[in-house]
Image: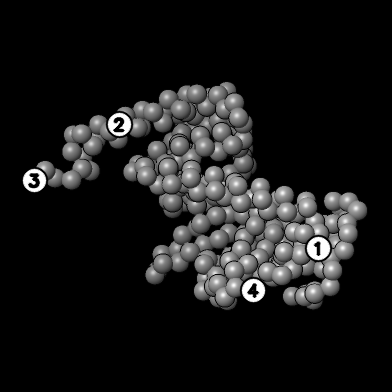
Amino acid sequence: MFGRAGASIGPMTSVDEQNERLLARFGRRFQAGEVLFDDGDPAGDAFLLQEGRVRLIKKVGATERSLRVLRPGDLFGESALLEGAPRTSTAVALSDGVALALDSPTFQQVLSASPGVGMRVLGQLIRRLRDAEDQIEVLLLRDGKSKVVVTLLQLAQQASREAEGAVEIRVSPLELSARVGLDVDSVKRTVQELRDAGHLRIIDERVELPDVAALRELASLFGIRDQLRGTTGEGAEPRR
């Protein structure tokens, strides 16, 4: 790890200098495949990801589910900010990278001394609340294809306030899987079907939606289909 400081962070004169001094004092480098913390462990540090990608997973019995895939700027392990709280997930590095690792007193000190970090954390928490609301909407859907389509529309809305024409979003199959609550293979099959139908194009880890309005119509058709299934008894509870 690194030295824990009770010493003052000190005034910062620029964003670059802030980042350099914070990384020099609190930076923790990790390698692909490294476990940063395990579910149930005592929570010591909260992390602000600076470089690389990290996957948060939750194991329930023999089942392992992705919760989120983190990118630079993301806050994770924040249970460390609550005294005596354990970890609620496992964090595994998907690539080499570096994160700021801060215990609760130091985290509060950094926020006070570095307004830029505070704004990043606030923005992160707002996004997390919005994502939680979006995921609740998705989890209420029964059909896997509907889940994927609605999630892509949500991401398109976040990427562009006027999401009607062509929109490009950055999301990997693993990230999409975590958001919709389905396994990666199921997500890949659905994405392939949507690509074959011309609803999207794949470029590396970017998804281009050539016509968001058409994708909205598809989501509406899925919704109508689910309603019809419900009224005709498919998947519905038997009458008494």
Callout 3: SS: loop
Crowdedness near tag 1: few (<14), some (14–19) or many (≥20) residues, C-alpha within 10 Å:
some
**Residue at the front extreme, as displayed:** 112
Q: Which mark is residue 225?
A: 2
- The residue singled out by tag 3 in the image is 240
Return the disc, 3 or 4, that comes first in the chain's sequence. 4
Q: Amino acid at mark 2?
A: Arg
Q: Amino acid at mark 3?
A: Arg
Do residues under tags 3 and 2 come within 8 Å of each other at their CB atoms?
A: no
Return the disc, 4 or 1, that comes first in the chain's sequence. 1
Q: CA distance from mark 2 to mark 4?
A: 49 Å
Q: Residue 217 or 202: which is nearer the viewer? A: 217
Question: Where 41 sits versus 81, above or below?
Answer: below
Quarter of the image containing the C terminus?
top left
Return the disc, 2 or 1, that comes first in the chain's sequence. 1
Q: Position of residue 1 (x, y in %)?
A: 74, 75
Callout 4: SS: loop
Callout 2: SS: helix
Q: Amino acid at mark 1?
A: Leu
Q: Amino acid at mark 4?
A: Gly
- The residue singled out by tag 1 in the image is 23
- The residue singled out by tag 4 in the image is 44
Q: CA distance from mark 3 to mark 4?
A: 54 Å
The quarter of the displayed image where residue 49 is located:
bottom right
The quarter of the displayed image where residue 170 is located:
top right
Do residues under tags 3 and 1 come within 8 Å of each other at their CB atoms?
A: no
Name the residue at 25% across, 31% down: 228
Name the residue at 48% across, 45% down: 133
Q: Residue 170 or 158: which is nearer the viewer? A: 158
